[in-house]
Amino acid sequence: MTQTPLPRPYRVASLTTLLLTVAATVVGLVVPGFYRDDPVLLPQIFGQDLLTLGVAVPVLGASLYYANRGSLRGYVVWLGVTGYLLYTYASYAFMTAFNELYLVYTTLLWLTLFTFVGGMVRLDAARLKRELRGLSVRPYVRFQLLLAGLVAALWLSEILPATLAGTTPASIADPGLPTSVIYSLDLGVVVPAFALAASLLWRRHPLGYAFTSVLLVKIATLGGAVLAMIVYMVRDGQVVPVPQIVIFGTLTAVSLGLIARFLAAIDPGSDPVAADAGAGREMEG
């Protein structure tokens, strides 16, 4: 039994996402003065665009191809990168200063939301669990709980003092934002998602394997985006604490290692793409 090829609506939605994402990131990176946001935010936006164009777009294209051929590995990566783009363009649609690509951002928001939700519903979680029955879940549970705790602690360390003092966190006040969409997305969606995935995985529930695989791909991609933002911020002369660089670099590297181990544990014989490749090597031999 294999993960069935993608239905046409999901293929079309992902291909449209690829085209619009390339257009949006190229315009943002190439057109001088295109973004109208506060200068303190521009390095973060440029870093996000660079990672999206240089990493997320090619990975989404490749994983879409393999997912459509019935590859479970390709399907998991496709969902994870789609989740990253959903997070990215939700933040652009709600927080980036209005510009000529606003309707592109909102279109990408609903395209990725449609694809991600529909793709998660179609993912054969029971099969994924069977494929990974020999994989220890402890490192994945611990990492997700650690990540949820770190993200919550990072944002609450800014939110709680401001709340108690009746002021506004500097990350909101300095660029003149009404609030932080990143706070909202991370504390309202990402942190609970990692906690839920860790809980389900610890109990060996099939959805725990599904959520974990997708979230790990998403966090690896998002971690890379944060590192790209840091590079732009340093070039801009902004001070970035060294511990922050070390933490995000370590989390990105660990998430990449864990997802690689996760994907490698899937039986190659049950993945039609891997099986085809193996058969081709045998014929060549």
Image (cartoon, grey):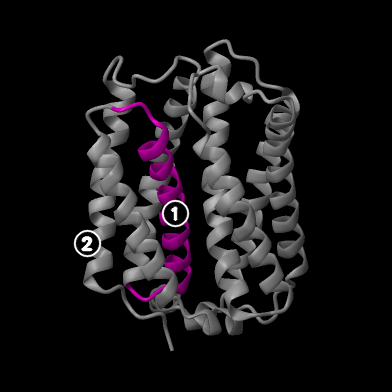
At x 71%, y 63%, the residue is 140
Mark 2 secondary-structure assignment: helix
Regarding residue 54, the answer to whether it shows in the image is no
At x 55%, y 25%, the residue is 172
The x and y percentages for residue 272 are 40, 79
Where does label 2 land, which residue?
Answer: 12
Residue 234 position by quadrant: top right
**Is 87 within the magenta?**
yes
The x and y percentages for residue 267 are 56, 79
Marks 2/1 in contact by CB < 8 Å: the verdict is no
Q: Quadrant of the N terminus?
A: bottom left
Regarding residue 103, the answer to whether it shows in the image is yes
User: Start and end of the magenta stretch?
Assistant: 69-98
The x and y percentages for residue 155 are 67, 37
Where does label 1 land, which residue?
Answer: 81
Q: Which amino acid does label 2 sit on?
A: Val
Q: In this view, does 95 lie above or below 176?
A: below
At x 57%, y 51%, the residue is 188
Q: Which of 199 and 261 is in front in this view?
A: 199
At x 61%, y 66%, the residue is 262
Residue 156 position by quadrant: top right
Q: Which of 82 and 86 is in front in this view?
A: 86
**Is 138 within the magenta?**
no
The x and y percentages for residue 47 are 47, 29
Q: In this view, does 94 lie above or below 131?
A: above
- Residue 160 placement, left or right of 1: right
Give the CA separation, mark 2 to mark 1.
16 Å
- Residue 25 placement, left or right of 40: left
Label number found at residue 226: none
Q: Is residue 136 above or below residue 33?
A: below
Q: Is residue 285 above or below residue 196?
A: below
